Image (cartoon, grey):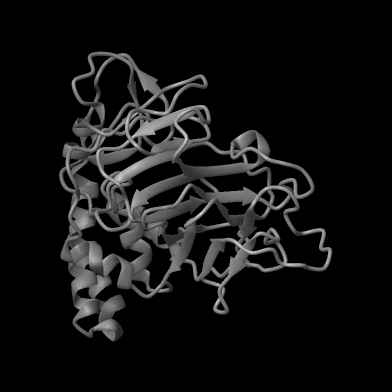
Amino acid sequence: GRARMGLGGRGRVGAGPQGWVAASCYVRFRPEGKLKITQSGSLQLAMATESPVGKLEDEVTCSICLEYFKAPVSIHCGHNFCQACIDQCWGESETNFSCPQCRETAQQRNCKPNRELGRIAEIAKQLSLRVAAGEEGRVCDLYEEDLKFFCEEDRKLIGLIYRDPLRKIANVTLDPDTAHELLTLSEDGKTVSWGGWHVLPHNPKRFNLAPCVLGCEGFISGRHYWEVEVGDGGDWWAVGVARESVRREEWIRCDPEEGIWALSLHTNQDFAFTCPLTLSWSPKRIRVSLDYEGGQVAFFDANSWASIFTFPLASFAGERIFPFFWVHGDDSQLRLYP
């Protein structure tokens, strides 16, 4: 069946042995089946972070499928998506067409082909293939050569794209100074598990009641992502991001009002945040994606690239944002990948 997302209010988590929940609900995604990682997708992860091709590539990627745009269309708010992706996202709706990125709603379906963006996406794809083939030194020459085929407006657009920040793979490690006393961290700082009682020195950064730990590095700008192996999950876990000012001395809830944007799995069906999720599959590895300036936190199945949930228009209020992890109960463990 379709993955679905309950909207609004508190309530019982959807049917099944495990309940997926998120702290607030703004978007509904209904993925049909699983997405495949294509050659272009693999190249996207392998691109050098400072490469001009990488910067261009980052801006010609559909935020739904995470692939190069295919037959891109502009919708009512001006955001762009693959035609097939937005059709799948909206399904058979006849009204209230909501943008998956900014949540602006229109009463009528409005999709205009964006052929210029499609051509730019094709250039980015070809350049990335050349880079992968070992032609990094010729990228700028190739870029200028390909621009000869574009009109002045296209060249201006690509110039702007080149100056945009690039989403970066974050090498996240766990901060032992923030870890609750009932959590055990691996020596490499990549794994957190429940169990054991550790007598630790007082630290104002440490979570005293909630079984949480933060990543060492926080972010105040840019777009970043990291992946977390959740396996079978255990009793209760959550992954996401948190403000630096999140409370440490008291019990906390995993929701934006607390400064936490997280996806959680809990075996107790009576426990729910404001948005229960029912998925038709059980992701084993979660990709957490943070767009600081865009105010967006998104979650994907890292193996299939299927979208799980997105928090748009988050309010970070200029604070540093940290990777966030919650582990509770027997057999509960999370591991950062790689």
Q: Is residue 109 visible?
A: yes
Q: Position of residue 237 (x, y in %)?
A: 50, 49
Q: Position of residue 43 (x, y in %)?
A: 25, 69
Q: Position of residue 52 (x, y in %)?
A: 37, 70
Q: Quadrant of the N terminus?
A: top left
Q: Viewed as shown, does residue 324 lie left or right of 159? A: right
Residue 231 sits in quarter:
bottom left
Residue drawn 70% across the image and 53% down it: 244
Q: Looking at the image, is 82 positioned above or below residue 321?
A: above
Residue drawn 24% across the image and 48% down it: 117
Residue 278 sits in quarter:
top left
Q: Position of residue 142 (x, y in %)?
A: 23, 75
Q: Nearer the viewer, residue 257 or 332?
A: 332
Q: Nearer the viewer, residue 211 or 293?
A: 211
Residue drawn 67% across the image and 38% down it: 258
Residue drawn 24% across the image and 78% down it: 131
Counting labels gives: 0
Q: Is residue 147 visible?
A: no
Q: Nearer the viewer, residue 5 or 218?
A: 5
Q: Nearer the viewer, residue 13 or 124?
A: 13
Q: Looking at the image, is 125 positioned above or below residue 14?
A: below
Q: Quadrant of the C terminus?
A: bottom left
Q: Looking at the image, is 116 positioned above or below residue 205?
A: above
Q: Viewed as shown, does residue 28 lie left or right of 35? A: right
